[in-house]
Image (cartoon, rainbow, N blue to C red):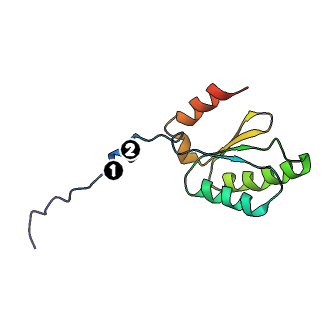
């Protein structure tokens, strides 16, 4: 047993630290009711990437179905759903809002 331990150097990826949540954002245009696409979008959210979704081409009933499901996923991650325009929404987990870049993005793009 020694009194002095070697210091462990922690390598930090500087590029990752400089990226904001907006830099990691993914964009989806949903054209039809497709559960596979919806699950892929939810996986993107669960993997820590904010998602902007355009639902203009969906019927109202399909749009409500989509919003209900994805909102449940976002709720489970303590995230937020923010409407950007009539049928364009931002979905993200709580952690992605910490750097403030998403709130700034919403303010810049809100119609």
Residue 43 sits in which quadrant?
bottom right
Q: Secondary structure at mark 1?
A: loop
Question: On the picture, is 60 further left or further right than 13?
Answer: right
Question: Which numbered circle lies on residue 82?
Answer: none
Give the quadrant of residue 15. Answer: top left
Dot 1, crowdedness within 10 Å: few (<14), some or many (≥20)? few
Q: Is residue 48 left or right of residue 18?
A: right
Q: Position of residue 51 (x, y in %)?
A: 64, 46
Q: Return the x and y of residue 8 as percentages of the image width and height.
A: 20, 59
**Residue beneath disc 2:** 17
Which part of the image, by quadrant, shows the N terminus? bottom left
Q: Residue at x 54, y 39 (%)?
A: 22
Q: Residue at 40% across / 47% down in the picture? A: 16
Q: How many marks?
A: 2
Residue 103 in percent (x, y) is at: 59, 33
Asked whether the beta carbons under mark 2 and mark 1 sit within 8 Å of each other, the answer is yes
How far apart are the alpha carbons under marks 2 and 1? Answer: 7 Å
Q: Is residue 73 shown above or below 95?
A: below
Give the numbered dot on residue 13.
Answer: 1
Give SS at disc 2. helix
- Quarter holding the C terminus is top right
Query: Looking at the picture, does residue 82 appear above or below residue 11?
Result: above
Q: Residue at x 87, y 52 (%)?
A: 62
Residue 29's x, y, as percent?
73, 46
Disc 2 packing (10 Å; few <14; some 14–19; many ≥20): few
From the viewer's perspective, is 41 left or right of 33? left
């Amino acid at each position: 047993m020694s009194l002095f331990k070697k210091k462990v150097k922690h390598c930090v990826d500087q590029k990752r630290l400089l990226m904001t949540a907006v830099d990691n954002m993914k964009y989806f245009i949903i054209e039809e009711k497709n559960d596979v696409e919806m699950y892929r979008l939810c996986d993107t959210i669960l993997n820590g990437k904010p998602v902007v979704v355009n639902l203009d081409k969906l019927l109202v009933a399909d749009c409500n179905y989509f919003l209900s499901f994805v909102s449940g996923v976002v709720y489970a991650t303590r995230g937020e759903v923010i409407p950007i325009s009539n049928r364009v929404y931002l979905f993200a987990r709580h952690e992605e809002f910490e750097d403030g870049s998403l709130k700034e993005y919403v303010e810049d793009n809100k119609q």
